[in-house]
Image (tube, coloured by chain):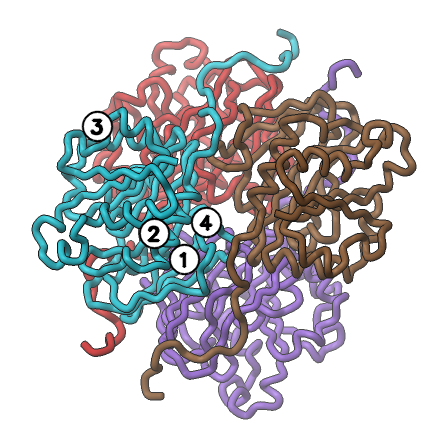
Chain colours: A brown, B purple, C red, D cyan
Amino acid sequence: MRVVVWNENRHEKTNQVVSDIYPKGIHGAIADFLKEDIEDVKTATLDEPEHGLTDEVLNQTDVLIWWGHKAHDEVKDEIVEKVHKRVLEGMGLVVLHSGHFSKIFKKLMGTTCDLKWREADEKERLWVIDPSHPITAGLGEYIELEKEEMYGEHFDIPAPDQLIFLSWFEGGEVFRSGATYHRGNGKVFYFRPGHETYPTYYNKEIQKVIKNGVKWVSPTDRPRPTYGNVEALEEISGK
Amino acid sequence: MRVVVWNENRHEKTNQVVSDIYPKGIHGAIADFLKEDIEDVKTATLDEPEHGLTDEVLNQTDVLIWWGHKAHDEVKDEIVEKVHKRVLEGMGLVVLHSGHFSKIFKKLMGTTCDLKWREADEKERLWVIDPSHPITAGLGEYIELEKEEMYGEHFDIPAPDQLIFLSWFEGGEVFRSGATYHRGNGKVFYFRPGHETYPTYYNKEIQKVIKNGVKWVSPTDRPRPTYGNVEALEEISGK
Amino acid sequence: MRVVVWNENRHEKTNQVVSDIYPKGIHGAIADFLKEDIEDVKTATLDEPEHGLTDEVLNQTDVLIWWGHKAHDEVKDEIVEKVHKRVLEGMGLVVLHSGHFSKIFKKLMGTTCDLKWREADEKERLWVIDPSHPITAGLGEYIELEKEEMYGEHFDIPAPDQLIFLSWFEGGEVFRSGATYHRGNGKVFYFRPGHETYPTYYNKEIQKVIKNGVKWVSPTDRPRPTYGNVEALEEISGK
Amino acid sequence: MRVVVWNENRHEKTNQVVSDIYPKGIHGAIADFLKEDIEDVKTATLDEPEHGLTDEVLNQTDVLIWWGHKAHDEVKDEIVEKVHKRVLEGMGLVVLHSGHFSKIFKKLMGTTCDLKWREADEKERLWVIDPSHPITAGLGEYIELEKEEMYGEHFDIPAPDQLIFLSWFEGGEVFRSGATYHRGNGKVFYFRPGHETYPTYYNKEIQKVIKNGVKWVSPTDRPRPTYGNVEALEEISGK
């Protein structure tokens, strides 16, 4: 399994709070815990040439993790098209937190992916809704985060193929926090937590979910279907 | 209820077979049978200014029906954006046959919407898979079309929110022929039959499905949710 | 449309708090507001012969509403079988609150339908998750109930065909509060609120949801499919 | 992983055609190919004490495969209850072919699970509908079986959580042939092929699907949720 952790990596350069929490960047922190289980973990960031997502990199990636926030618009449409194509070919995609507004997630969902939000150091509790799902392996009934940004419904996404987590927030909102989608040959997992000003990605349970998610979205070993004009498999009467 | 039947209306101008079957255009044929039940039915076509879909028209449309085939690329992106926005605001959308490859359907689905196809005068049988669904009202167990174009799986769409019809084709293929989706405040119904060289839209059962579909996608009377930064509804501890 | 409101009607006989709130019984209160829109609304209760659900009654019912709590076990299996059969034939079913543990709901779901609960006068906020769904017509973004019993996840049900409401509770839990299911020719709507010691069924928004729900589950006009041994529709090669 | 292949094992005792094809029983044939990949594969049959499904066996089973046909009624309700409980606790269940009418499958589905059928040596073609699903790993676009019993829609099941295969039959029918369900902590995979008078379980692609299915339904490592009366996690105002 070959994983690439993609990060916008802008807050880390301009906000001392963020760089203090994530000295190696959010991508670095995520790559670090993934390496505990997976040998081939690389990172890529917005300001690299082609955002670090060259054809060579994409073609050798089984699972792509995406974190972005303030610079979604700077991601080139051409790269988004390539990532989209790769997902439909089978590459897994894990979209984290504010990645809900990324071009690639919106393109795959077909909706605005808009939501309510608030920064108020709120307690978040992520309840497991589907205890049969492999993404919940090793977890208890809920994950509690002492302080996080709030995301609230309505979350403008298509109904998830599987809904896995629901968040409760102190200030009165709920949110579909863990959702999976099948798109073409590929699988997508959206997971809510991870605002840049909190140390969320050091939380062991959050790490477990992301590890499980990477495993769950990993490619199914099979060819992409063929499309277009085809011959009949059976004789058609009178022809 | 205000319905607009949109048609590319190009085959009708260049192919005698098509214009013989549909002298008033495919849009005209569909509008005709809808008017049996609905008072306010209009049509719009590609070659009209703004494709007949001005802001005024779109804002006064409850349900839009879409038929297109050979000129999908000529539909302006700007109009597609407006239709997309209206669907998310609640306008119903019924996509017919080769409309699977329209810009608006692909944008709402997030996938290629590709499929297999063959023109060989094949028998098609559309089986009712969800007999509880209002779109199947008044139908028997299946609809039989003596001759149609074949569409076959894999159909590269997200798993439908509700799968209503499955087609059997003489030449050996199957197809998810009736599928519904919820997107934002809007509802979408894709219905497969209706190749331009067959008189499919004169079939009374096909007409019934389209009538039922129009009713099913019609807007739910409620506001679009609000999005963005919000105040807490509950007191947050220590604040 | 012919509606029957079924109620266990036991708390009303033994608990002064409940009979003060619902002097005509929970069934009476629900029937009263449904009659504002629907002409033919009847009630039936546990202690009537055959629980008020004779063959004659069931065969003339389009939509059955179910409220039960402490006497689920006293509902005769034979009656449950008949109701189950009628749902699969197309009769709509609206299951309210503690009806989650009724024999009929458990039989239709195939799971324990268990959940967490607490009686602590908690604020409940039911968020609209699917703003396109007709059951949400006329509502705002959420319904607030000042005091209700808490129901919390995990709710041991199959993933709903459509998830419509999510509840937030003051004490830290979330719950899938509005869920629809298609079963055979029938449709089922589970709606959470309505603990017997609160005046929830006088709340205008709750009434609107139940009215919308009754409309949504109402039968689709079509025959039940045929099952069993059948002749081939097409010639089978070499036979 | 510990797998138990359960078989009614009655046709094998009374029908020479069946015992010639499956000299070790259908269970023996399935166990044989599973053992290529899995170490701990056992079998159990109807006529053993407790149908071979003692508490000890069930408690040590990760995945149960079920084949039954003519003796569904002889399976004791008490054993069905135990299997049901184990599925909700996380044991995977693979239901094959005529197992659609088994007590355990009907109990988990909540519907009649009825269908159309015909024995006419028909060609079946199972099309892959969800190419992202791990159950399709290693397959092409469809599996072809030269001769099989026909199963046709309407198949009276709840809409699958994931629909994976659709069958085309020579005689004019279609069928949802591969379907998965989440129930409690457990996962269920229904797979259509395998009539007793055909050598279907020797087909390498069918074997691959069953192997993939066993892997897919295998238990997620996590506790069953707790249910019932609970304390509040957060302070409730005024209490």
Instruction: Give how far apart the Cα atoms at labels 2 and 3 are.
Output: 25 Å
Three-letter amino acid code at the position of disc 1: Phe
User: Label 4 neighbourhood size at 10 Å, few (<14), some (14-19), many (20+)?
Assistant: some
Instruction: Give how far apart the Cα atoms at labels 4 and 2 are.
Output: 12 Å
As rendered, which of C6 and D188 lies closer to the eye?
A: D188
Circle 1 sits on which residue? D165
Three-letter amino acid code at the position of disc 4: Gln
Query: On screen, B190 above or below D31?
Result: below
Q: Is disc 2 placed on a helix, strand or loop?
A: strand
Q: Position of residue C218 (x, y in %)?
A: 40, 46
Residue C220 at least partly seen: no
Circle 3 sits on which residue? D78
As rendered, which of C227 and D238 lies closer to the eye?
A: C227
Give residue D162's mark.
4
Q: Position of residue C230 (x, y in %)?
A: 20, 63
User: Which is closer to the viewer, label 4 or label 2?
Assistant: 2
Q: Do labels 2 and 1 touch, CB within 8 Å?
A: yes
User: Which is closer to the viewer, label 2 or label 3?
Assistant: 2
Residue reaching furthest bottom?
Answer: B16
Q: Position of residue D165 (x, y in %)?
A: 41, 57
Q: Is disc 1 placed on a helix, strand or loop?
A: strand
Q: Is disc 4 placed on a helix, strand or loop?
A: strand
Instruction: Give how far apart the Cα atoms at labels 1 and 4 are.
Output: 10 Å
Residues beneath discs 1 and 4 located on the same chain = yes
